[in-house]
Amino acid sequence: MEPPMQQTRLDTGRVHAARRVIDPVFLGSPLYRCEALEPVLGCAVSVKLETANPVRSFKGRATELIADGLAGGGSRAAVCASAGNLGQALAWSGRGRGLDVTVVASRSAPAAKLDRIRALGARLELVDGDFDTARERAADIARHDGVRLVEDSLDIETCEGAATIGLELAEAAPPFDAVLVALGGGAMATGVGHVLKDLAPGVEVICVQPLGAPAMTLSWRERRVVTTGSTDTIADGVAGRLPIPAVLDDLLLVADDAVLVREASIVAGMRLLFEHAGLVVEPSAALGVAALLEDPARFAGRHVVTIVCGGNVDPAAYRDWIGA
Amino acid sequence: MEPPMQQTRLDTGRVHAARRVIDPVFLGSPLYRCEALEPVLGCAVSVKLETANPVRSFKGRATELIADGLAGGGSRAAVCASAGNLGQALAWSGRGRGLDVTVVASRSAPAAKLDRIRALGARLELVDGDFDTARERAADIARHDGVRLVEDSLDIETCEGAATIGLELAEAAPPFDAVLVALGGGAMATGVGHVLKDLAPGVEVICVQPLGAPAMTLSWRERRVVTTGSTDTIADGVAGRLPIPAVLDDLLLVADDAVLVREASIVAGMRLLFEHAGLVVEPSAALGVAALLEDPARFAGRHVVTIVCGGNVDPAAYRDWIGA
């Protein structure tokens, strides 16, 4: 791949600046070797843990930037579509700055996520349909009410927030051979990927998506937007059908690979992370381990980081997944 | 209580110095509000999370100091008794410095802890009996082999390592009203307590121990060492019978209270931390939440920190505890 820098929508200087805006509770998340996983996975595995914060996902890094910008600009309201984590995070960041936050989500999103969005004081509107249906409805609300529409992965702050994870990985010693990033809309993959390609270009950036929600991966492989008619995965956080062209353009510049994993591997990944690392993770956060399970030869002997991006699960569903 | 400073065996300056020795992977652990717990518990609850590191407990803070001192002093071997977490941590810290580490543990310690001690390269000797039996055996080995005996809670490094948690709490803003500390041998309680009484004397330091292993709490209440004939608790990490006089003396200076909780409350605490915070914790790490459950009136409306001190559980036992 040719050097991609100065071509994505991201700028590493702005990502550095973002760290001065984001509440420190979301920054400097734990990064550590999980040796107990390694005999099973056949490679050195470090975890970047994004669940030990007030919203239990990495999305607070982004919503801090958004809410800060809104409050600074005098705007007092925002609406977003969310699979559940962005909405929680925007509610949290907005509450701290006196913003009116509306979140549109699918009625089928995990109850734990929806409950937390409400508890954090956001107005929650549920739609019949999936995440992309919610996106349409959020856009309608924004147009009708004249409030800021926050679009995950399209809005640069959502990528820059996630990109601060990339800074923390790039600053870690020793360096890693590869980083596994869950791929949904692409904010985390393009954000982390941009920074790593800029500051640690030797690190392989591998995106992981469920076979049951492959739109962005298919798009990356074909180098053009490929949409799908539906999704079928337990990884609710990454279940999109309609890739955003500008995000795909960035992803083409920073991702070294994009792989698809089976549902059974995602469940096995969650179970491994519970049994050997003591981590409760949502399905999207187990995608990296799923990729390691599906292609051990590729990673044998290498040092891999997997970003554990969220831990918001319905307890009953989680109990089933870990083999109760 | 009279100002206790200059009276405990700890010195806050040395605790500051300790932070420059301890591997950063153990420092700056997450500290965050868990609002999802609050409707159940009736107070503001923050978690200080000591499980997101290579040994899944706070003990690495102490063993880094011990191993650094040993390596600097030219000694190459150490032996400790352990309920499982100190041994893992000493094995980890010793391995990085080329030390020979022997751990003596009870045959009834959780298999997950014993497996990790072996996997980290320590020699593991199992004894019939409990933690205090292991302490006797470790002392015998140290005498016989002429190697350093590491005694949890008695050796000042074990208190100073834990005390670095206190620095991180004292530096947090806003300040807290109370901190709940699991009480076993007393290293964490005296370490954290010393620093808080020095730097944030308004914070109430409350030790929590199981009713089934009450020796140190009874000792604190009677202001003299009280031993018990046996222990009966799932909280393996704090199950001691024989309080150490010097540690009790320190505890009398820094603890505002010591409470005992029922086994059912410990299990309920683990379940709450799983369901509402997504945290896998070992029984000892749920003692704080257990105390909140047992005396809600005491904590109503206050802001409490609970130190989640370890997450090493046998998966099968844990599944039973959380009702999976």
Image (spheres, coloured by chain):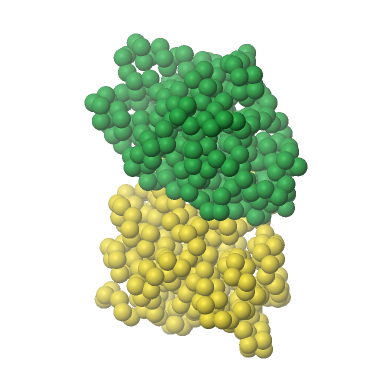
Chain colours: A yellow, B green
Q: Is residue B280 above or below residue B246?
A: below
Viewer-closest of A135 and A27: A27
Q: Give the residue drawn at x 39%, y 46%.
A: B25
Task: State the residue lying farthest toward the right.
Answer: B297
Viewer-closest of A50 and B204: B204
Residue A266: x and y in percent read: 53, 57
Residue A48: x and y in percent read: 44, 55
Q: Give the residue drawn at x 42%, y 43%.
A: B26
Query: In the rendered image, is residue A144 in sight?
Result: yes
Residue A278: x and y in percent read: 53, 44
Task: State the residue lying farthest toward the front.
Answer: B2
Q: Give the residue drawn at x 58%, y 60%.
A: A55
Query: In the rendered image, is residue A194 in sight?
Result: no
Residue A6: x and y in percent read: 31, 79
Question: Is residue B269 left or right of A27 when viewed as pictured?
Answer: right
Q: Quadrant of the C terminus of chain B?
A: top right
Q: Quadrant of the N terminus of chain B?
A: top right
Q: Quadrant of residue A176?
A: bottom left
Q: Is residue A308 above or below residue A145?
A: above
| Count of labels in the image | 0
Q: Is residue B94 above or below residue B51?
A: above
Q: Give the residue drawn at x 33%, y 58%.
A: A171
Q: Is residue B200 above or below residue A27?
A: above
Q: Quadrant of residue B201?
A: top right
